[in-house]
Image (cartoon, rainbow, N blue to C red):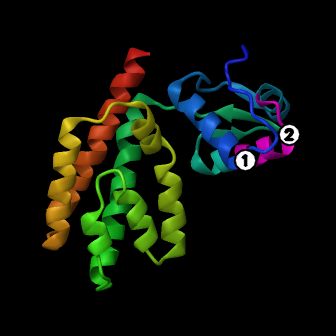
Amino acid sequence: MDNILPKLDNTQTKDRIAKILRQEIISGRFKNGEQLTQEQIAQYLNTSRIPVREAFLILELEGFLSRLPNRHVLVVGPKIDLLKDIFELIASVEIQIIKILLNSKKDIRNILVADAKQFRQVLLTEIDNYFIKENYSRLLVGYPQYVWDNIEKKSSDEDLHNSLITSIQTHELKAIAKFVYKYYFSLADSLTKKLNRS
């Protein structure tokens, strides 16, 4: 394996390592089915094995790595035919969070004024259910975060966001679902196109 990863200093955390590895997996630099070891990644990142092990555990929980014996893991890279299913699941969770917030009679002004970039972070802040919050957060740091960080935003995304906000204001659940699904299918489409080009 070529030394393609950026060097880390010892102050970096397991989360930073997980983010770097996640990006490398989604981008295809680490191929689906490729074996990685803690020692190998620690050497490339110029860090100790312990935060790499912790990062591997995070990525295993997120579905990007599968554990093998002897501190080895197998890369579970993106499969284009499954991306729509993944984004549909994330959309379903987001729709449920919005429904919970609307049914809770909570003040939703923060949600209504959030721009497209802040919207999901505001949902995470507003939801009181820790289990849902943690799992939604894990879903967002994977494929959606990769698209947000690496693929140019479509002009239609802002229109979808504005339509979603209007639907939330009027509590139109069918319209909320429609716009959330459209948004995430747009992300899936953008990622699919990028992966097909590489």
The residue lying toward the viewer, choosing from 162 and 23, is 162
- Image coords of residue 188 (percent x, y): 34, 37
Query: In the rendered structure, which amino acid carries the disc numbered 2?
Result: Arg
Counting other residues with Cα less than 10 Å from the Cα at mark 1, is it few (<14), some (14-19), or many (20 or more)? some
- Report the residue at 78% width, 25% height from top: 44
- Report the residue at 72% width, 47% height from top: 14
Q: Image height check: is 168 above or below 183?
A: below
Q: Rounded to the nearest whole Å, what is the CA distance between mark 1 and mark 2?
A: 10 Å
- Image coords of residue 119 (percent x, y): 34, 58
Q: Image height check: is 71 above or below 28?
A: below
Magenta includes 52? yes
Q: Which residue is mark 1?
A: 14
Magenta includes 15? no
Query: In the rendered structure, which amino acid carries the disc numbered 1?
Result: Lys
The mark total stands at 2
Q: Decide: marks 1, 2 in contact (CB < 8 A)?
A: no
| Residue 150 horizontal side relative to residue 41, left or right | left
Q: Secondary structure at mark 1?
A: helix
Q: Quadrant of the N terminus?
A: top right
- Report the residue at 72% width, 13% height from top: 2
- Report the residue at 53% width, 54% height from top: 138
The residue lying toward the viewer, choosing from 113 and 144, is 113
Q: Quadrant of residue 6?
A: top right
Q: Secondary structure at mark 2?
A: helix
| Residue 62 horizontal side relative to residue 197, left or right | right
Residue 49 numbered mark, or none? 2
Q: Quadrant of residue 171?
A: bottom left
Report the magenta residues as a range: 45-57
| Residue 9 horizontal side relative to residue 198, left or right | right
Residue 3 numbered mark, or none? none
